[in-house]
């Protein structure tokens, strides 16, 4: 088994033990503030940060498996991200390493998820919270799923 190390000492399993549905994780490395997604603090676009269940009460991480057909480009035109996801989906074993399937918004929900990336010759486990940037009208800013209740690509 390939060693996967936590990024910036954020160990998914340890954080999962510290957080739960009443004490949701908030990522200190990527706070839910405008400057996390804008180059300039002067840019204001009415961003509202929401968790998936606030966007869709029936939110699920995955519905009927992962598919390249699930993906839609976000409001910012992030076609390169969509193409990258679609490409890696062609290799199911590699994709399951990048996005561990044992994550959900119901079983042991704690507001945190993890993804793995191969960076400079080593696998890193990246932990994030599930707060998502939305426009003032509630639409997701970045990638979205064709099924509005599924959130794995966002």
Image (tube, helix red, strand yellow):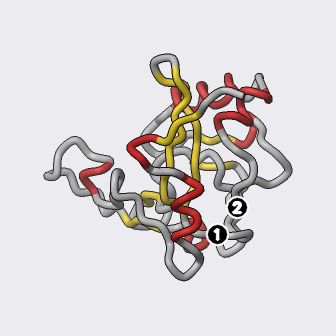
The quarter of the rendered structure image containing the N terminus is: top right
Q: For mark 1, does the 10 Å Cα neighbourhood hold few (<14), some (14 to 19), or many (20 or more) residues?
A: some
Nearer to the camera, 76 or 41: 41
In the displayed structure image, the side of residue 120 where residue 39 appears, left or right: left
Q: Position of residue 42 (x, y in %)?
A: 14, 52
Nearer to the camera, 131 or 82: 131
Q: Position of residue 119 (x, y in %)?
A: 48, 24
Residue appearing at x 42%, y 47% in the figure: 9
Helix, strand or loop at disc 2? loop
Q: Which mark is residue 90?
A: none
Rendered position, 90 above or below 96: above
Helix, strand or loop at disc 1? loop
Rendered position, 48 above or below 78: below
Q: For mark 2, does the 10 Å Cα neighbourhood hold few (<14), some (14 to 19), or many (20 or more) residues?
A: some
Q: Position of residue 24 (x, y in %)?
A: 50, 72
Residue appearing at x 74%, y 36% in the figure: 96
Give the labeled residue for mark 2: 104
Residue at the far bottom in the pictured view: 22
Q: Position of residue 43 (x, y in %)?
A: 20, 51
Residue appearing at x 52%, y 67% in the figure: 51
Rendered position, 128 above or below 46: above
Residue appearing at x 67%, y 22% in the figure: 87
Residue at the far right in the pictured view: 64
Q: Are marks 2 and 1 in contact (CB under 8 Å)?
A: yes
In the displayed structure image, the side of residue 71 where residue 126 appears, left or right: left
Q: CA distance from mark 2 to mark 1?
A: 7 Å
If you read the primary sequence from the N terminus, does the residue marked by circle 2 or circle 1 appear first? 2
Residue at the far top in the pictured view: 121
In the displayed structure image, the side of residue 70 where residue 139 appears, left or right: left
Give the labeled residue for mark 1: 109
């Amino acid at each position: 088994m390939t060693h996967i190390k936590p990024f910036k000492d954020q160990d998914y399993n340890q954080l999962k033990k510290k957080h739960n549905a009443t004490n949701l994780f908030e990522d200190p490395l990527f706070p839910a503030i405008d400057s996390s997604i804008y180059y300039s603090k002067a840019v204001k676009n009415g961003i509202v940060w929401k968790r998936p269940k606030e966007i869709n009460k029936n939110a699920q991480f995955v519905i009927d498996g992962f598919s390249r057909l699930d993906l839609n480009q976000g409001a910012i035109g992030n076609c390169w991200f969509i193409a990258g996801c679609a490409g890696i989906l062609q290799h199911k074993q590699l994709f399951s390493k990048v996005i561990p399937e044992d994550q959900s918004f119901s079983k042991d929900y704690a507001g945190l998820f993890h993804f793995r990336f191969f960076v400079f010759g080593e696998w890193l486990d990246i932990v994030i919270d599930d707060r998502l940037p939305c426009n003032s009208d509630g639409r997701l800013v970045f990638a979205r799923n064709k099924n509005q209740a599924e959130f794995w690509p966002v």
